[in-house]
Image (cartoon, rainbow, N blue to C red):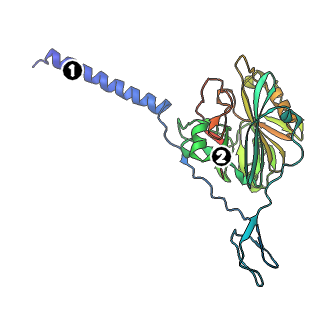
């Protein structure tokens, strides 16, 4: 019995449609569709707040540690006024910032943030000068709230909005690598060693640098690591530049858009993004980026992912000019929650 030509053609067409559909799905699954990874929930931070209550009658100042008010013996039931000490800026503002332009501010009982635009290395540079009451104010977020997996990327804007942030900056793109220490919001997410140097923000508000090959993630965690980022290189240690354009990485030798993080003192940080690859902004090599950090008073500083990923976001908008003309989707960011 012979097969009719039309039936044969339909069979061949069906085969190719299935083949194209399968190939398309495989390509989308491999390069586009997000899948896999570990879902990460936001931390619940409990902060003890000491509040001073002053009554308008005779006697009294009552201090509580849980945010509630009480009236002790001999006090009155008159209306009370609650006062909090708040934060004060430590020291003086660096001269390079005083000469720049303030483009945004945010203040809460636990966060002081001033956003500046300055010029350095023939580039527009954006600096978030941040003072926090506690290191727990510095938070990490992942695209789709997921660490690892494939194609798990979102813009910094999306992550910031999803986490009710007031400020955000791209960080180390931890999901891009298969090895390297990762600690976020006080949780160890990856413990495999890479040949990179990392930086850790400890719960006491101090910042340390480390070579992953010389320690373990558990040892860093036991020191109180709240966040650990692994990208690099280290820019500044003990107030001295340690970055070099001769470190063997092409990305460090040439002018590039940059993002980074620096510590001026305990709970006092600088988050920095340098524009680049445009006529207005050339970008910075790794040594120039280190000198920017030193000019800001950083005693420790670290390089985050840069290039088209370099993005700084504040109060609902991207403040820098990403080199690709629009935000690149990345795997993670650092943010400060609006309170």
Q: Reply above or below: 31 against 146.
A: above
The residue carrying mark 1 is: 10
Front in this rendered view, residue 152 or 312: 312
Can residue 320 be seen? yes
Residue 315 horizontal/vertical position (percent): 65, 41
Q: Earlier in the sequence, mark 1 or mark 2?
A: 1
The residue carrying mark 2 is: 140
Q: Quadrant of the N terminus?
A: top left
Residue 224 horizontal/vertical position (percent): 75, 55
Residue visible at 28% across and 23% down in the picture: 15
Q: Badge 1, how many Cα within 10 Å: few under 14, some, many 20+?
A: few
Q: Reply above or below: 154 against 7.
A: below
- Disc 1 is placed on an element classified as helix
Front in this rendered view, residue 283 or 90: 90
Q: How many marks?
A: 2
Residue visible at 57% across and 52% down in the picture: 41
Q: Reply above or below: 76 against 25.
A: below
């Amino acid at each position: 019995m012979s097969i009719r030509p039309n039936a044969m053609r339909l069979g061949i067409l069906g085969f190719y449609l299935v083949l194209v559909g399968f190939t398309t799905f495989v390509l989308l699954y491999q390069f586009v569709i997000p899948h896999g990874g570990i879902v990460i929930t936001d931390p619940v931070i409990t902060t003890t707040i000491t509040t001073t209550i002053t009554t308008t009658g005779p006697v009294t100042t009552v201090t509580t540690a849980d945010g509630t008010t009480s009236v002790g013996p001999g006090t009155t039931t008159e209306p009370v006024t609650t006062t909090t000490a708040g934060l004060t800026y430590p020291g003086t503002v660096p001269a390079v910032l005083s000469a720049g332009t303030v483009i945004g501010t945010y203040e809460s009982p636990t966060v002081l943030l001033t956003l500046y635009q300055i010029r350095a290395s023939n580039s527009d540079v954006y600096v978030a000068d941040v003072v926090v009451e506690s290191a727990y104010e510095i938070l990490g977020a992942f695209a789709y709230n997921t660490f690892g997996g494939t194609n798990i990327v979102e813009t910094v804007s999306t992550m910031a909005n999803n986490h009710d942030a007031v400020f955000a900056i791209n960080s180390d793109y931890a999901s891009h690598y298969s090895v390297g220490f990762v600690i976020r919001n006080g949780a160890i997410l990856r413990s495999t060693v890479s040949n990179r140097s990392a930086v850790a923000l400890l719960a006491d508000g101090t910042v340390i640098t480390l070579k992953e090959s010389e320690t373990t993630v558990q040892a860093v965690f036991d020191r109180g690591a709240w966040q650990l980022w692994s990208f690099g290189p280290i820019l500044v240690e003990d107030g001295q530049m340690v970055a070099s354009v001769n470190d063997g990485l092409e990305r460090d030798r040439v002018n590039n858009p940059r993002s980074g993080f620096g510590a001026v003192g305990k709970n006092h940080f600088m988050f920095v993004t340098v524009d680049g690859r445009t006529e207005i902004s050339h970008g910075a090599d790794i040594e120039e980026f280190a000198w920017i950090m030193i000019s800001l008073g950083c005693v420790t500083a670290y390089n985050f992912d840069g290039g088209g990923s370099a993005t700084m976001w504040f109060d609902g908008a991207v403040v820098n000019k990403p080199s690709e003309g629009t935000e690149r989707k990345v795997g993670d960011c650092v943010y400060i929650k609006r309170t």
